[in-house]
Image (cartoon, grey):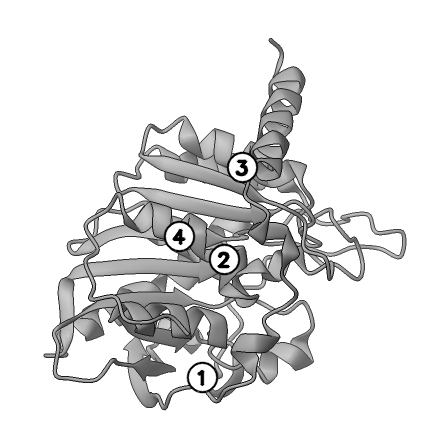
């Protein structure tokens, strides 16, 4: 079977899998139920990121920390945020952790740390995650982005956060789960490709880069390069991982994520790809910030297979 036929077969299988998901996956509206209540109080901390500042200096990164009641130690979710296409939006970025995700992890008894990487919002500093992707007025990609560079830059923040966790008595550093959304998903896959003591697995929600739903809806810039990059990460990944993309991802479309994961999976790690049904409001890329019933069953099934224990409480 030639590569094009293999991709079509993989996409057909993914679509069939999505349609086989129970009805709850298609009946929900966006997470208005989760958004109606205030967020639990978090603590703002500062973390030094070596090499992330101007001319290779260290940068100071702000992060939000959320802990369940008690002294711990708690298993830790390290959440990596996405990237807005617009520079003004990036300048006003928050930590990117939404109510739906936060309530899910706290209900399990996990602590959550959500860094705001250098180049975003209050963390400030140079924008090292600019891939160089650009679209013309016809939605055509006119540049050659550098996804390896942006992934390496983003991983510095994960490394710095993991080092900081080792100084916190409340953190169970033997049970850390990486979770990321969009650019944070690519960050998570890149970070998970290196053996890191205590990191037991990761979840990639809609991971990728180079997409712009306004300029080129459903088609990112040079997705074939990301196929190569994800393949490279797959060859060095040893921890179990879950990839979750919606069929109507307005940044990347339905086909590219299938090819990305197929390339990654050839590396042989214990990996699962879920192509979730299209979201009714069109915001497939933002699946992870919608109501838990749209994504939590996939996460629960994955967590049941890895060493990430937590005391489950009543879910919000």
Between the residue at mark 1 and the residue at mark 3, the CA separation in whole angstroms equals 31 Å
Mark 2 and mark 3 in contact? Answer it, CB < 8 Å.
no
Image mark count: 4
User: Mark 4: which secondary structure?
Assistant: helix
Q: Residues within 10 Å of mark 2 (few under 14, many from 20)?
A: many
Question: Label 1 belongs to which residue?
Answer: 123
Sequence-earlier tag: 4 or 3: 3
Foreground mark, 1 or 3, reads 3
Give the numbered dot on residue 260: 3
Question: Label 2 belongs to which residue?
Answer: 150
Sequence-earlier tag: 2 or 1: 1
Q: Is residue 12 left or right of residue 21?
A: right
The one nearer the camera, 279 or 245, is 279
Foreground mark, 2 or 3, reads 3
User: Mark 1: which secondary structure?
Assistant: helix
Question: Label 4 belongs to which residue?
Answer: 299
Asked whether the viewer can see residue 171, the reply is yes
Residue located 27% across and 71% down the image: 313
């Amino acid at each position: 079977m030639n590569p094009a036929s293999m991709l079509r077969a993989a996409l057909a299988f993914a679509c069939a899998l999505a349609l086989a998901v129970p009805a709850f996956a298609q009946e929900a509206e966006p997470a208005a139920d989760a958004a109606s209540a205030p967020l639990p109080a978090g603590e703002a901390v500062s973390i030094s990121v070596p090499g992330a500042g101007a001319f290779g200096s260290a940068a100071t990164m702000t992060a939000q920390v959320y802990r369940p009641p008690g002294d711990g130690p708690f298993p830790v979710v390290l959440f990596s945020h996405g990237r807005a296409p617009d520079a003004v939006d990036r300048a006003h970025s928050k930590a990117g952790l939404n109510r739906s995700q936060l309530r899910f992890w706290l209900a399990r008894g996990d602590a959550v740390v959500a860094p705001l990487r250098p180049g975003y919002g209050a963390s400030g500093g140079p924008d090292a995650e600019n891939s160089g992707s650009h679209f013309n007025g016809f939605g055509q990609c006119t540049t050659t982005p550098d996804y390896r560079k942006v992934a390496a830059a983003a991983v510095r923040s994960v490394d710095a956060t993991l080092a900081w966790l080792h100084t916190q008595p409340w953190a169970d550093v033997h049970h850390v789960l990486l979770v990321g959304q969009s650019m944070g998903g690519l960050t998570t896959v890149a970070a998970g490709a290196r053996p890191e003591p205590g990191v037991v697995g990761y979840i990639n929600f809609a991971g990728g880069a180079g997409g712009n739903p306004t300029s080129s809806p459903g088609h990112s810039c040079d997705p074939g390069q990301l196929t190569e990059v994800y393949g490279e990460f797959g060859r060095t990944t040893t921890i179990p991982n879950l990839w979750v993309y919606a069929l109507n991802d307005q940044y990347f479309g339905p086909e590219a994520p299938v090819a990305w994961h197929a390339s990654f999976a050839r590396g042989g790690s214990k990996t699962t790809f879920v192509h979730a049904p299209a979201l009714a409001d069109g915001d497939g890329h933002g699946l992870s910030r919608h109501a838990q019933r749209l994504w939590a069953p996939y996460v629960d099934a994955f967590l049941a297979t890895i060493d990430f224990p937590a005391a489950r409480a009543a879910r919000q």
